[in-house]
Amino acid sequence: MLRIAKFFAPKFMSGREERLFLHPRSFLGSLLKKKKVLVCPLDWGLGHATRCIPIIRELLKQNLEVWIGADNRPLHLLQKEFPDLPFIQFPGIKIKYPHRSLMVPYIIGLIPVMRRAINQERKILDKLIQEHKFDIVISDNRYGLYNPKVLTVFMTHQINLKIPRWLSFLSPLVSKTNRRFIEKFNFLWIPDFENENNLSGDLSHWGTLPTHARFIGPLSRFEKKNVPNLETLHPKYDLFAIISGPEPQRTELENLLIDQISETTYRAVVVLGTPESSQHSQIGEHIHIHSHLGTK
């Protein structure tokens, strides 16, 4: 279970309060009952938004007041998961991938665009802090959401960014720039295991990590269920596919996947990763299409 107390305590509590805060049955709820938290995922597919779901659940469990700042599909997704929470439409950088052969020059061209987006995010966040009096901001890969007035957390597993080999001479500069932005935050949360049996590999397990880094374990909106007599059950479907990512690649993958499944007899469910729509359709007798499915 994610322990929010463990990651927040050292920055704004006395030694005695910190010991209470880190206790297995800590007084987190009473100590932080007035703390107001803004959670902001990156709008780059749905992965950032979905891994914020267990974070938000834990914050709510700890009796913190949670607001969500998002845009486009992440906003639609989180509104469906948490319909009772307050939301702020918080735009970020607009990402739309080009054809594969143009990917590298496109990413290079994004650098000045990202800088402008980061500066814009900082300005918006400063206004939101003044207006809503947030105490804590949790940013999932949004580099502009740091502010000296509040406690800020940056969540990512990409500490060491990978670039093509023919651009490897830029790797030190890219890594240095990435870390410079990350170090502006009070804490760095890495959603992975700390040991060698990890998920992110060199992205977060190579070299020296920033001193404010904390491994918080993998994040998923799904929970393990104990199903009796699981080995005797007969599955209704043979294949379950979940699609996500920036456009137009998400649509290209959707079309490719459905075309390939159509050539088989697999009983399949395909979730399109488009929570803004409510499509539920069927192709033939064996392919069921859903724009989005909630966690439950």
Image: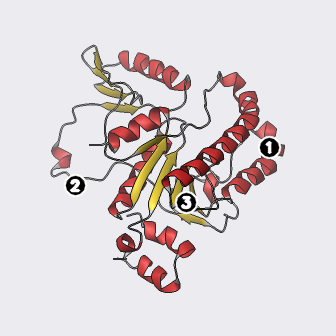
Given contact means CB atoms under 8 Å apart, are the residues at marks 3 and 2 in contact?
no
- The residue pinned by badge 1 equals 168
- The amino acid on which the numbered mark 2 sits, given as a three-letter code, is Asn
Question: Quick one: SS at disc 2?
Answer: loop
Up the image or down, 220 lies above or below 210; here it is above
> Residue extending furthest bottom?
16
> Residue extending furthest top?
284
Residue found at x 62% / y 67%: 212
- The Cα atoms of the two marked residues, 3 and 2, are separated by 29 Å
- The amino acid on which the numbered mark 3 sits, given as a three-letter code, is Trp
Is residue 155 shown left or right of residue 268?
right
Which badge, 3 or 2, is on the more N-terminal residue? 3
- The residue pinned by badge 3 equals 189
| Nearer to the camera, 242 or 123 | 123
- The Cα atoms of the two marked residues, 2 and 1, are separated by 47 Å
User: Badge 2, how many Cα within 10 Å: few under 14, some, many 20+?
Assistant: few
Residue 141 shows in the view? no
User: Badge 3, how many Cα within 10 Å: few under 14, some, many 20+?
Assistant: many
Is residue 45 shown left or right of residue 159?
left
Q: Position of residue 229 (x, y in %)?
A: 15, 50
Looking at the figure, which quarter contains the C terminus? top left
Which badge, 3 or 1, is on the more N-terminal residue? 1
Residue found at x 34% / y 63%: 63
Which badge, 2 or 1, is on the more N-terminal residue? 1
- The residue pinned by badge 2 equals 226
Residue 43 shows in the view? yes
